[in-house]
Image: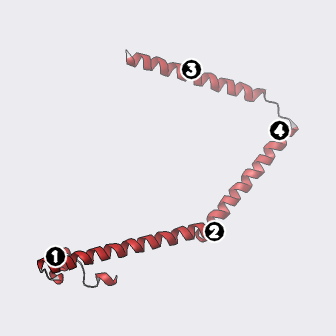
Amino acid sequence: KKSDDLEATLNSIEAAIESLRTTISEEEARRAMTEEREAALARRSELQALLAALHSERRKYGASDPVQINAKRRAIELAKEAANRHTDNTMEVISYFKRTRGIDPQDFRAHLEIPEDWEDL
C-alpha cells in the first residue's frame, strides 16, 4: 500500500536524522578547543554584537533613510495621480449622462452619494 510505503520512508528519514544528530554530538565532543578557536569564537561574538548594535542604530534612523523617503514620495505621487485619474473619470461619467440622458448632475451625485465638494477633496 501507498501508506505503508510512506510510513517506511518516514521511518527511514527519522532514523537518518537521529543518526546525523548523534554524529554531530560526537564530533562536537571531539572538537579540541584551541587558543586559535577560542580567539575566533570571541571575535565572532564581538562582531555579532557590533552587527546587532548597527542594526539597532539603523532602525532608529530608518524614518529618515533617503531611500525610504524617496519610495514614500513616489508612492504618494502615484496615489495622487490615481486619485486625480479616478476623479476625472467620474466627472466624465457625470458629464456623459448629462449630455446623453439629460440627467441632472445633482441627481446623479445624490444617487451615487457623491458629495458636492467631492472634486475639491
Query: CA separation, marks 2 and 3?
Result: 49 Å
Q: Earlier in the sequence, mark 2 or mark 3?
A: 3
Label annotation for residue 111: 1
Amino acid found under the numbered disc labelled 2: Tyr
Q: Earlier in the sequence, mark 2 or mark 4?
A: 4
Under tag 2, what secondary structure? loop
The residue positioned 46% from the left and 72% from the top of the image is 76
Under tag 1, what secondary structure? helix
How would you rate the neighbour count of disc 4 (Cα within 10 Å): few for under 14, some for 14-19, many for 20 or more? few
Q: Earlier in the sequence, mark 4 or mark 3?
A: 3
Task: Tell me residue 16's x, y (percent).
Answer: 58, 21
Residue annotated with mark 2: 61
Query: CA separation, marks 3 and 1?
Result: 70 Å
Under tag 3, what secondary structure? helix
Residue annotated with mark 3: 15
Residue annotated with mark 4: 37
